[in-house]
Amino acid sequence: MKKLEEEYEKIHPKIYTFFYAKTGNQATAQDLCHDTFYEACKNIASFNGHSTLSTWVFSIANNLLKKYYRKNKYQQSLMQKLASLPDNEIHSLEEMAEINEDTKILLHHISKLDDASREIILLRIYGELSFAEISILISKSENYTRVTFHRLKLKIQKLMEETL
């Protein structure tokens, strides 16, 4: 439990960002983040150390997200929302800076990826997980995860160059 408390400050923003990227809703992301750490605290005795604490917490987060999707039948991600965000929802210059055209195009391209590919991208970029940690979460080898991410990155870069 003490180790979870020590890691909380480092892991919490990553978990929140992961949920926000997946749901596009701040309140939902906060609720799921809270539920993740509640489950982690409740089940800390089951943490066996075969993976990092961060990977273990992300696996809880991923399971809660799947449960949330099943319960609510809500599968629209942040990328899809941002790609179709109407200009009238941007209220200030700060919001315009946050959601600039390049970002919208990038997120649009990411949203077009299949679920498995999108999962690797989101866990690597938003979750800031290592390839080893991602490989555990998606039940693939570390090499597969590394190569797939590299290929996806090149694919998205090429699409961005064509778009811009």
Image: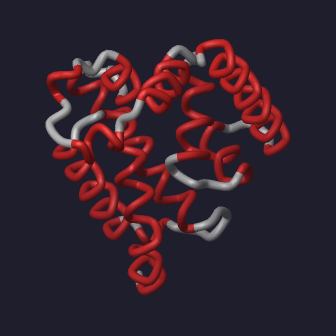
Left or right: residue 114 compared with residue 16: right
Q: In this view, does 50 lie above or below 69?
A: below
Q: Where in the figure is residue 137, as x and y percent of width and height? A: 60, 44
For the point 41% across and 55% down, which residue is it? Answer: 15
Q: Where residue 100 sits: x, y (%)?
A: 40, 33
Name the residue nearer the viewer: 163 or 36: 163
Q: In which quarter of the image is the C terminus?
A: top right
* 103 lies above or below 81: below
In this rendering, the answer to whether 119 lies above or below 108 is: below
Residue at the extreme front: 93
| Position of the N terminus by quadrant | bottom left
Displayed quadrant of residue 154: top right
Q: In this view, does 160 lie above or below 62?
A: above
Q: Nearer the viewer, residue 40 or 150?
A: 150
Is residue 78 rendered to the left or right of residue 30? right
Residue at the spot 42% in from the left edge and 70% down from the top edge = 44
Left or right of 78? Residue 125 is right
- Give the x, y percent position of residue 24: 29, 34
Q: Residue, x 72% and y 49% (percent of image)?
A: 131
The x and y percentages for residue 153 are: 71, 31
